[in-house]
Amino acid sequence: MPPEGETAMDLAADSLLAEESLTEVRDLPRQRVEVTTGRSVVAIELALGWDSGVARHTEVQIAQKVNLWRDVLPPFLETGLVGKPVGHRCEHRCGPGELVAAYREVDCVRIPRQRFNSRLLRSGYVEPRAGRFYPRGFVGGLRDIYPEDRTPFRLAAIDGDQLHAELNHPLAGRELTVRAELLDAWDPGVERGGLCHDLASMATDDGPGMQARWRDQPTDFWSDAPFSRLAPGGDDEFYGKPRLVDHIDRTATRQIERLYGRLLPPGGRLLDLMASWKSHLPAALAPAHVAGLGMNAAELDANPALGARIVHDLNLDPRLPFPDASFDGAVCTVSVEYLVRPFEVFEEVARVLRPGARFVVSFSNRWFPPKVVNVWQGCHEFERMGIVLEYFLRSGRYERLETYSLRGLPRPEDDKYAGQVALSDPVYAIWGERR
């Protein structure tokens, strides 16, 4: 089966694509052009920046085959890209209602509790929770919504037997900044037929905005035994055998390395939390020391980046075996979804970081099903960034919170899922600075 320092906009300003990725974006052979025309096909990096009040957010979407004469571009992108050379960037600040539909109070609808179809899914009964997203089919029959509609909507609030169904786009009412970069361009030759894409929808739909709170009210992720697991026993047996496998594809790994290279200080003392046989730290960081804390001694021993290797089960004991203010930065890579005591762990990470040091948490959409916590599985991918944001916020020990998403890069041709999944594993990251 296939797999399930700088501000956020500063990160988006410099393309996070490695040189190898540019080659992967191209679908050779074709006739490349250096300057676009109205008939060019282009690859574009779209970076969407916005502020929720609690955190800053950057969503990066790679549009690989945009046809400038057939696809629908917002006017500012059309004027900013047509006739421009490869490598050109343009930026536009969008007021509320310009890129997504304007917010309408009439689309935040009060409905009786019985209108929420808790038995819609075959997977079992679903209890409505404030702030969470559900397929619109859960309120089928409301307005023109059909039970088959899987478009997400937010259950904004619960007031006794009344539910507030938020039908506006998650980004409605926000000021947005869009930055586009031309990654590649080519002459399509003779074309017949084809699909028409809407770039505004590509940049804003299917997730962006869902990681934020509704009107600054904490999302109820914590009902329904959030940290229970399919395999509730101890982790020592499950992780006792070294696996030495990659949990994300090579392209996603490279993007996480580049992100860490931008966010962590060169030459610093770093903590790799829930570490394995790779630390995803670029060589250019040249850290003075990396301490790896993980579950398997053989995997830690195989990691050449580590200067200290500590076998420690955070789910049994969330205390970190380090003095206060020991590190200049910390990372947790594709592992946060296994924590059953995350609030205590995030408190501990803050304790061992120096003031101003960043804690960067990254993940994708793949995991070990027996050990992932219950709340993680039942959420949309963008809601999972909201879960991690709540971990940071609950501690009260972090500031300058930011989230980052990257989607749309092609999967490496030699990846074992290349024939089944066209795109690389998405990258999601959340970070904050220790107060």
Image (spheres, rainbow, N blue to C red):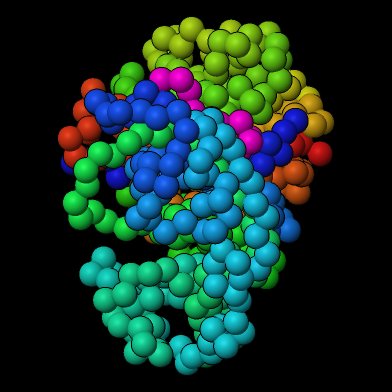
Q: In this rendering, does residue 86 appear at all?
A: yes
Q: Nearer the viewer, residue 114 or 76?
A: 76
- Residue shown at 31% from the left, 75% from the top: 149
Left or right: residue 234 compared with residue 13: left
Q: Quadrant of residue 250?
A: top left
Q: Point out residue 65 in the picture as x, y percentages from the top left corner.
A: 34, 43
The image quarter containing residue 152 is bottom left
* x, y percent for residue 34: 45, 28
Q: Measuring 56% from the left and 51% from the top, which residue is drawn there?
A: 79
> In this rendering, would 115 be left or right of 360?
left
- Report the quarter where the C terminus lies: top right
In the picture provided, is 50 more to the left or to the right than 397? Answer: left
The residue at 51%/41% (across/down) is 83
Q: Is residue 117 visible?
A: no
Does 416 sit above or below residue 404?
Answer: above
- Pinpoint residue 315: horizontal percent, then vertical percent: 51, 38
Q: Position of residue 393 (x, y in %)?
A: 69, 51
Question: Magenta segment, which residues?
Answer: 11-21
Tell me which residue sits at (63%, 9%) in the image.
286
Q: Quadrant of the rendered structure where residue 404 is?
A: top right
Q: Nearer the viewer, residue 80 or 54?
A: 80
Q: Is residue 153 above or below residue 17?
A: below
Q: Quadrant of the N terminus?
A: top left
Is 259 or 352 nearer to us in this picture?
Answer: 259
